[in-house]
Amino acid sequence: MDKTLYSKHQQTLLGLLRELRQAAGLRQQELADAISEPQSFVSKVENGERRLDILELRVICQALRISLADFVVMLEKRLDK
């Protein structure tokens, strides 16, 4: 599997994060405020310039009001397509 920041799987992950943020009605700045990070952090994550570790992903999921487990299920479904 390709492990670059721009692999198909990585792009699927980033797309899901962006989609969930937008579905929650949050702008990047609002999500950034909720996770105590600068807006540039959210932008870099969504653009693939920065990878998340599992704990950062958990914090983002909490801010989006989705459990990490539910996020993983959603991601797995998209990766299996």
Image (cartoon, grey):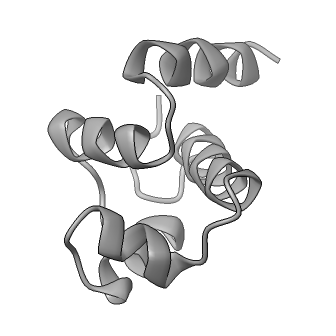
The answer to whether residue 42 is left or right of residue 12 is left
The answer to whether residue 35 is left or right of residue 47 is left
Work out whether 71 lies above or below 38: above
Residue 60 placed where, x, y %?
Answer: 36, 48
- Total numbered circles: 0
Outermost residue on the right side: it is 81
Q: Choose top left, top right, bottom left or bottom right for residue 55.
A: top left
Along the line of sight, the residue nearer the viewer: 7 or 68? 68
Along the line of sight, the residue nearer the viewer: 17 or 4? 17
Q: Choose top left, top right, bottom left or bottom right for residue 61.
A: top left
**Residue drawn at x 52%, y 45% as measured from the top left:** 10
Kindly tell me whether residue 46 is visible in this rendering.
yes
**Residue drawn at x 40%, y 77% as measured from the top left:** 44
Along the line of sight, the residue nearer the viewer: 4 or 49? 49
Kindly tell me whether residue 3 is visible in this rendering.
no
Work out whether 44 lies above or below 64: below
The answer to whether residue 6 is left or right of residue 56 is right
Residue 79 placed where, x, y %?
Answer: 67, 22
The answer to whether residue 4 is left or right of residue 18 is left
**Residue drawn at x 20%, y 70% as measured from the top left:** 36
Q: Choose top left, top right, bottom left or bottom right for residue 81.
A: top right
Residue 26 placed where, x, y %?
Answer: 61, 68
Work out whether 51 lies above or below 70: below
Residue 73 placed where, x, y %?
Answer: 58, 12
Work out whether 33 lies above or below 45: below
